[in-house]
Amino acid sequence: MKKLFGYGLACLLCLLAVTACSEDDPIPSATVERTVLVYIAGDNNLSRFALADLEEMREGMQNTNGELRLMVYIDTGSAQLIELKKENGNVVENIVREYGDRNSAGVEETREVFEDVFSNPDFSANSYGLIYWSHADGWAPYGSRITTRWVGQDTGDGDNRMNISELVSVLDNAPHFSFIMFDACFMSSVEVAYELRNHTDYYIGSPTENPGPGAPYELITPLMAGSNAAVEMATAYFNSYNEIYNGGIGISNSNWTGGTSICVIQTSALEQLASVTAQVLPETTADNEALRSSVFDYDQRRESSSSYIGYYDFKELMQQLVTDETSLDVWEQAFEESIAYWSTTAMNYSQVVGMFSMEDANGITHYIPGSNTTNAEAYKSTSWYQDAGLSRLGW
């Protein structure tokens, strides 16, 4: 008994020696509920909106309760990383790092910022969120590189844009996100959401062109740390524009009366949606021209334009393709399970045609191949094309 007691006491003293902190040891910072990175690639013609949105974020932080740490990377010509945090009733703002003039659409530059935020223990949290702010064009190819789909634009030195697969490579080294939101055009794309499905619980984007002022950050910032943040943020986003919507009369960037649309996709449902899509699609060569003329298109750019892609309504497309009612019912159930939130005003605004009807819109876009063979070939490289069985249609 004496030997056992002595052994136990020795172990206890050893444990105390290992776990006791000396007065010289650093005190770890308190972990917040959520750290959110807003990545603003604004070194382009949107720079004035970037600065306005940063001010809205400062305003929104005043109404948080200390559970959110907001990290803002902003590049409007010279890039910096800013920390915003609520402490003792005050918003504390700290410039973490100055990056200078750089390509914010570059892979290594983006990865460096992600590491500065998510690999730094000072910014650790119980959960994480990401907002990507810039120009974008869904899954679509940029230039002649047929394997690219792009997001983010930096025109500080040339015209630089990021491949979606390159963004995924950056996300591979980041924590899993509670939400990823794109404050950018045409990003409620099933193809892009599917590529990012393993990196986030919820995917937020608009199926059409974003309003000039973008997200109302003074309203959505206080919601970012909540357990149902994605849906609550999207709801506040939509309501802010819906309250002043009047069909676009008197529209301006300071009085956006042209409405908006926004969708929240539940990524855990996307693999089932792809599987059901592959099961119900007919094995027949689709009449793409007929589909493109009959299915609702969110892309109001002229089809003859080199910038035109075609972002067609996914649900309406499947209603055209699947004639068996039982199969269509099964598919529509899978589709509805993938949508956590969807709202649109009666009309949206396009800088090409002005106001246009959203009558047949259901929130998620899908590509239909057209005369642009570069786009059609690039589409085959998407994971969605492969997993949803789109080769059955002769695409």
Image (tube, rainbow, N blue to C red):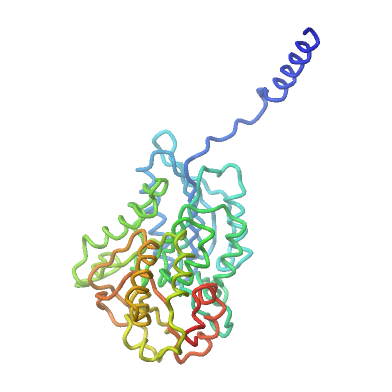
The N terminus lies in quadrant: top right
Is 334 or 54 nearer to us in this picture?
A: 334
Is 57 or 280 nearer to us in this picture?
A: 280
Is 207 or 24 nearer to us in this picture?
A: 207
The quadrant where residue 301 appears? bottom left
Q: Residue furthest right?
A: 3
User: Residue at position x 78%, y 15% from top?
Assistant: 7
Residue 196: x and y in percent read 52, 64
User: Residue at position x 55%, y 82% from top?
Assistant: 378
Residue 192: x and y in percent read 48, 69
Q: Residue furthest top?
A: 2
The quadrant where residue 107 appears? bottom right
Residue 305: x and y in percent read 41, 89
The quadrant where residue 146 appears? bottom right
Does residue 137 lie above or below 202 as drawn?
below
Is 136 or 383 nearer to us in this picture?
A: 383
Does residue 132 lie above or below 380 as drawn?
above
Does residue 299 lie above or below 215 as drawn?
below
User: Residue at position x 36%, y 52% from top?
Assistant: 220
State how many labels appear: 0
Residue 20: x and y in percent read 67, 22
Instruction: Tell me if 81 is positioned left or right of 53 in this view.
Output: right
